[in-house]
Image: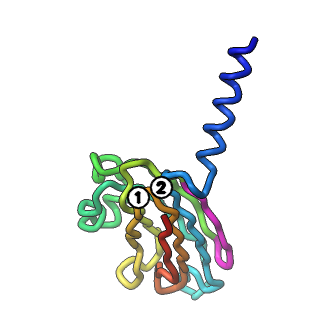
Amino acid sequence: MHRLLLALTACLLSACSLLSPYSDMTKIDLQISATDALNPDLHGRPSPVVLQLVELRHPVAFEQADFFALQQRPQQILSPDLLALQELELRPGEQRHFKIAAGAEARHLGLIAAYRDLPNTRWRIRLDVQPGARNQFTLALDEHGISQRHTTGEP
């Protein structure tokens, strides 16, 4: 019984260290805001956008691939640099906040936005991540694409 109590206490303490601002884990605090004019259709009406968030070791394949390759075959195109992939939908006027515990090898976070007018929008952005730090990014999505508003990286 005494050993079980010690093991349980050790597990709880290790879980607390993961959430601690003083741990050496790489953390990404991502704030994404969409304007009311997001992704206009042919009649100028705003529309939702599908976003892919990718954690990467190296950014080269991400930056060189075209939209359709990244959207349809991300594992194949980004391998072996792909560490994690998440997909979500963002509606006009919506704000989302993500707290990501990045993999130890993550050095970049890439975002791919499925805009209707790909040739005239910035549909891809790469964020450089400081390992072992708390990284904060604020992004905006509007009718022109993705843009970075603010960044900090704290140990």
Q: From what the image shows, is residue 12 above or below residue 2? A: below
Q: Residue at x 57, y 65 (%)?
A: 29
Q: Residue at x 39, y 58 (%)?
A: 71
The coloring applied to the image is: rainbow
- Which labelled disc corresponds to residue 131? 1
* Secondary structure at numbered mark 2: loop
Q: Residues within 10 Å of mark 1 (few under 14, many from 20)?
A: many
Q: Which mark sits nearer the N-terminus, 1 or 2?
A: 2
Q: Is residue 15 left or right of residue 84?
A: right
Residue holding disc 2: 26
Quadrant holding the N terminus: top right
Q: Percent x, y for residue 20?
A: 62, 52
Total tally of numbered discs in the picture: 2
Q: CA distance from mark 1 to mark 2?
A: 5 Å
Tell me which segment is drawn in magenta.
Answer: 91-100
Label 2 is placed on what type of residue? Thr
Q: Percent x, y for residue 104?
A: 41, 48
